[in-house]
Image (cartoon, coloured by chain):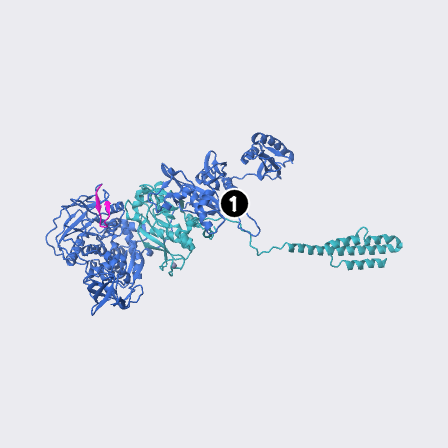
Chain colours: A cyan, B blue
Amino acid sequence: MEDKIKQIKEEFKEKIKNKSLKELKELEIYFLGRKGKVSILFQFFKTVPKERRKHFGAKINELKSFIEKGISTEIQRAESIEASRKLEEEKIDVTLPGIKLHTGGLHILSQTISRAEDIFLSMGFDVMVGPEIEEDYYNFEALNIPEFHPARAMQDTFYLSKKILLRTQTSPIQVRIMEKYKPPIRIIAMGRCYRKDAPDSSHFPVFHQIEGLVIDKKVTFANLKGTLSLFAKRMFGEEVKVRFTPSYFPFVEPGAETSISCVICGGKGCSVCKNTGWLEMGGSGMVHPNVLKNVGIDPEIYQGFAFGWGMERIAMVKHKIPDIRMFYQNDLRFLKQFKG
Amino acid sequence: MLTSIKMLKSIIQFDYTPEELGEKLSMMGLEVEGITKVRHRFDGIITGKVKTIHHITDTKLNKAIINVGNENVQIITAASNLKSGDVIPVALPHSKVVSGADILKKDFKGIASSGMLCSYSELGLDPEILSGEEKEGILILPADTPVGEKIEDILPIDDDYLELSLLPDRADAFCLRGVARWIEIIKAKEEDRWANFSQLEEAVSLKMEGVTNIPIIIENKEFCPFYSGRFIKDVTITASLLSLRQKLFMLRMRPVNNVVDITNFVLSFYGQPLHAFDADIIKGKICIRPGKKGEKIQTLDEIERNLSNANLVIADESGPIAIAGVIGGFKTAVTEKTKNVLLESAYFSPRCVARSARNLGIITDASAIFERGADPLFPSKASIVAANLISKEAYGIPAKDNVVSYLPPKNPVNLRIARAEKILGEKVEKKSLRKYFNFEGFDFVEKEDQFIVSALSFRVDIKEEVDLIEEIVRMKGYNEFGEALIVGELKGAKRTEYENFIWDLKEKLVKLGLDEIQTISLVSESSLDLVGYTDKKKLIKLLNPLSIDMAFMRPLLLPTALSVLERNKKSENVNVSIFEVGKVFYKEKLFKETDELGILLSGARTSKNYLGVHFPYSLLYLKGLFEELFLYYDVPVTFAAEKFSFMHPYQSAGIYLKEEKIGYLGTISMAVLNKLGLTDEVFYGAINVEKLLEHYGGKINFETFSLYPSVKRDIAIIVDEDIAEKDVRNAILSVAPHELQKIILFDIYKGSPLPPGKKNLAYSLEFSSVDKTLKGEDINKFIEILEKTLQEKVNGKIRKE
Ligand SMILES: [Zn+2]
């Protein structure tokens, strides 16, 4: 009997080596099944003398648990091998390109406009809009540009009728606001403007302008400089400087052309700034008393400043875009460069 | 305007480089846009005089004997504009012309030629500043040009020119002396002294004989407050002599004849437009009056122009002989035959000349000056300067001029110091003001708290107090002022409600996977024809378009969206999903504008990939986008099949909000795509944005949702093929309990085993209740009712497995 037990143990030790999960299940039945080798041992039990039974009983149980343990350990081992083999089969080449799902984006001009609006909103400016089809009065006359004024030739205008035109600037919004609201006024007027300019790399008959207007009792030339300087820093970076040069716009006096230090060469001079170190951004100045009078504001009590910059120009400088026509061609290879 | 540094230096001394000068002028407000440096690019070309010239028989050639100073040379030339005595540029052997070619000794059929005679192109001269004759053949130099001299010493070719941008309010910067005055101010500032402009004026005394007998009558004193006419007898009209010619060359004026050249010189040098009439052609008295309807004049450019009362004219008894301040008449022009001249020097008001020039659609140097404001006090002096030159160059004998003047005195301008301080935001010292006004050469009287300033007569831009405040800023320097932030009451700044809505809309569309485009709002008629736009009465046409491609205000966004698509397909961008929110325009008694949203899809949402995952855009994908938008804004719209000229007739719909049509969508027709050379399907839809906003509540309230498990039930409904899905869906909704949360159409099937003419619509219905777990029986009751309803409304049956 003893030999039998020993023999089974040896057989088990021999058979358990490197078996698959399926083989292990078969072995389990072979040894521990109802008719398995171990169960059969219990049949021999009757033939064993009574006093030895306890001893053999313990021995068989020991064998049984040894086999159970051995099989369960091996099953675990085989299962883990099986699992990892399966995972290996599921291997994905992670260097393969991902599936591209088309996503959308705002036009770079909208992104720039939104940014400019946000900067001025944070400085307490309301954002205003107005019609693109305008009356001659609002676009010119109320702005101190009477009929036949040479300044009209600076802004070649599209007319729809004798007195109706496509606005050449967003300044008419200023006039409409001043007619409607009493000072203090602190607004920007944003929108699409039109000028009869043949398209080239820096001109397009359609463009967007941001126009600012501040009217109060003590708004000074220093405030104009401070406001535009802060805007330029927020828009283009802290290192950017603003320069004012005398210029003429009929609705402001003193009037200035405003430039920023060239963001491409840092002011050293390059082809973009024509070696001047400066990039012209637009006009500005103190609102002309005649403009205030035209809307019924007393220029002896109230004063203020105004400025007008081109949004395409801002975007071109900020993103080094070489040609204004690109904004309106809408080539996706252009649009997709500006994720927003 | 190009201003010669060489000529500037001939009247004012300065040591700045052209670049430095440009920077200084720009910082004073006279913008220098660039500097043109001209250098001669030829070598060894000298002046020579034609001694004899003979035609060589049986050829197109001439044999010329040319004196080049110390010798005579024989040159064969094809030029036909030469006569003996002409002074011309000669390129001797071994010299170089502009093209870089070396000149060699040559033989023409056995006749030796020692060089060549030069036209302007061999010298690289700008044809703009040459007379017609000079442009066509060999360049003929003034008769008094010395012989044997280097051509670059005769014509002042080597020079630097400032490219000045013209200011609308500063006519004084239009002439050489005017620019010299700006330089004098720069120098006065740097040397801290009073500007002395008188050094820039030549003192002239004029020898006169007799008086001008032609009577002058001014009808419109406001438009012409000053007119001087001066009779100059016995003039000899020839080409100008070398010294004047050299000045014209630097002033970039085209030579005509000595008298006309002198008037042009005075214009470019002193900024005073003059006009010389042939006095013998003038009939009777001169009248300065408005033009009359029906009157015509042939102007100097030989164009016949119709006049009206928008033009002020100079007329004699036969009619208009010049358009005041704009251009002279052809009939009375000075020619070689002219013996006696009437010299006009006048002041015409800016409004007068601007209106007249706009009306005629012409701009001349004279009109540009007058409409910006000429110096009202200079015409008398200008007449003397010009008459003096005419007496020297054309040997004329000037008479005393006949002057009519209604010039009002110019009032000084008050500057309140406190006012200047209030505008500028800093203290303004009296001592600084004295300095600034001295730099500009202004006269002033000081009072306790103000300065009373008399600007010089050419400073027509100084009209009121604020103009003097600008002078303070210019003289101190724009960048010498501090920067300060606005101080004021704090209030919340905002966008308008409408603008907030537009931004929100755009962001929503981007989240839906669309790219925003911005297109031009000016379109061509053909682009509208392409999409079959027929509502021509509503179309807005520009009165003065840039070109026919941009002649109309767009009435819809589709044409430009299609051209963006076309462009991208050409660039191999095959997957296009774009939108634009922009203004469209139409005429309805008045000109109107409104915002439209257009969405265009073509290609697929996914790029071509190795997994074969493909998500092509379709009409119903587009519809899904619109539905998502309407859901987002909680706007109840309906879609109804409708035909459009540019859409597939059975794949298009109108979009309705209640009874009102607010947009449309569909598949662009093949006919349109073929014309654009496009092959892939294109889906397009547009809605009126303002209508959307009108119905958008703008409020989002929390709605409770069920915490109990939902019950799903799939049903298949068999209906006739031509029943619209919308009707089946509405039939379901009409009897559905409020527990029905979702209704999803997940399959459409036609064909066997269904009988022909039938289709099967499979819906997945999801029910849930906020207060209990639903049971199967609850749903069964609804299905029973639904069966009946479907039968009645759409002749449908629920299919049972
Ligand atoms: Zn630069």
> SS class of the residue under badge 1?
loop
Taking the image in four quarters, ligand 1 sits in the one at bottom left
Asked if residue B414 lies left or right of residue A14, the reply is left
Q: Is mark 1 within 8 Å of ligand 1?
A: no
**Front position in the image: B47 or B577:** B47
In this picture, residue B519 sits left or right of residue B417:
right
Residue picked out by circle 1? B617
Count all numbered tags in the image, as a single digit: 1
Instruction: Identify the residue at horizontal 51%, vertical 49% (top origin).
Output: A102
Residue farthest left in this picture: B210
Name the amino acid type tagged 1: Tyr
Residue B513 pos. (x, y %): 50, 47
Using residue B526 as the reference point, say whether residue B387 is left or right of it.
Answer: left
Image coordinates of residue A207 in percent, x first then y, are 38, 48
For the N terminus of chain B, the quadrant is bottom left
Q: Which residues are magenta?
A: B294-305
